[in-house]
Image: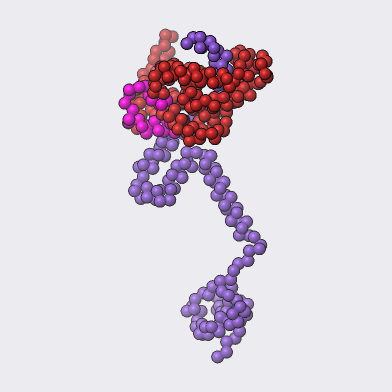
Chain colours: A purple, B red
Amino acid sequence: MSENEDNFQSLRRLLVLKQYETPPPGYFNNFSSQVIRRIRAGEKVESATPLEQLFGSVFGLSKLLRVLDAKPVFASGFAGALCMVLLFGIVYAERPDLTPQPMLQPENASGVSLAALSPTALAQPVSQVGIVSSTNPVLSLPAVNANFGQQIPLAQPVSFQVPHF
Amino acid sequence: MIMSAPVIRPDGSETPAPVDEGVLVQQARRGDLESYDELIRRYQERIYATIYHMTANHEDANDLAQESFIKAFQALKSFKGGSSFYTWLYRIAVNKTINFLKQRKNRIHLSLNDLDFNTEHNPDLVALISEKTPHREVNLAELQEKLNEAMLKLSEPHRLVVVLHDVQGMSHDEIAKVMDCNIGTVRSRLFYARQQLQALLTDYLK
């Protein structure tokens, strides 16, 4: 065996180089605390109430939170991904080529006014009619009492055909 | 660090004696995380180094070392004390690393740690880079990379034997216990692994 050892003298000298590969300074200062934190996080999940366990298992949140808590790299990656989604949402929402679609078809499209379809609606008080969601309003809302007794009329520009009774 | 009764030095000063490993293990088995923290501190460098030399990747070694300690804590109740805690912990780390490497297969990504500045003061290593090798002259960083690439070409059991013996200085007997095989197997694996390495690194050896 000693002859074999002699044969590999220079290789063994070269392998000594591996002993000089050291992790970044201070790496081991936080190592044990990170392990203990991960153990505690695992115990917390095990000792969670059945409701918490159900919530965690249904949404996978507890696992995700544990991973994020244990590995800051994942946490920053996750936060970055959320920011990207948010930015994409803002940019997409503000695209000029996207026009909002009306909830009700414009009158011209059908040729019949909304008021003509339901003439009784005009006769009813607004409180009974309720708020009509439309980009093409057909109702004039009553004036609103402002401060100091002033009357502020609520007028909206409308364009509709007068119903023929 | 957890200490027991102080030890009186010959000069009369007192230093706290480190707690016996067996006591720490018993306390950790009962869920005492402070004791387990002390056990981690004792072995973190050796466990990390073994995994790092097997993977040649700092991030992987960090993850695997942490997971090994977590798994060991969870399995402490099954630790019978047939071997030392150190050997038992090593086995967990080694098995975890080998499983990881099998899953990773050929997707090798080197993430090497920097060389300690003392490297340049090692006469053997200085001789390797200052004297012209048969084919080329290299610097330490290049030599480090070539050495790691050659190591990764070995099979996991062969690489492990080289790491434990030639890098970490473990005896054949200790390696046999960690790898759960006989000493003859350790010796033959070491011989074969060195032969392979020598062939791979022939340009860089005198």
Residue at the image position 61 percent from the left and 16 percent from the top: B205
In depth, the one of B119 and B141 nearer the eye is: B141
| Residue B86 sits inside the magenta stretch | yes
Where's the N terminus of chain B, which quadrant?
A: top left
Residue at the image position 57 percent from the left and 52 percent from the top: A85
Q: Is residue B62 visible?
A: no
Q: In this view, does A58 lie above or below B165?
A: below
Residue at the image position 52 percent from the left and 42 percent from the top: A75
In depth, the one of A7 and B119 nearer the eye is: A7
Q: In which quarter of the image is residue B21?
A: top left
Left or right position of B166 against A107 = left
In depth, the one of A82 and B109 nearer the eye is: B109
In depth, the one of B194 and A150 nearer the eye is: B194
| Residue A22 sits inside the magenta stretch | no
Residue A131, how many percent across, how many down? 51, 74
Residue at the image position 51 percent from the left and 34 percent from the top: B105
Q: Can residue B98 be seen in this view?
A: yes
Q: Is residue B175 above or below residue A146?
A: above
Q: How many labels sit on residues? A: 0
Secondary structure, magenta segment, majority class: helix
Q: Which residues fall within the magenta stretch?
A: B66-91
Residue A14, how many percent across, how many down? 57, 17
Q: Quadrant of residue B118?
A: top right
Residue B83, how many percent across, how many down? 35, 22
Residue B109, how many percent across, how many down? 57, 33
Where's the C terminus of chain B, which quadrant?
A: top right
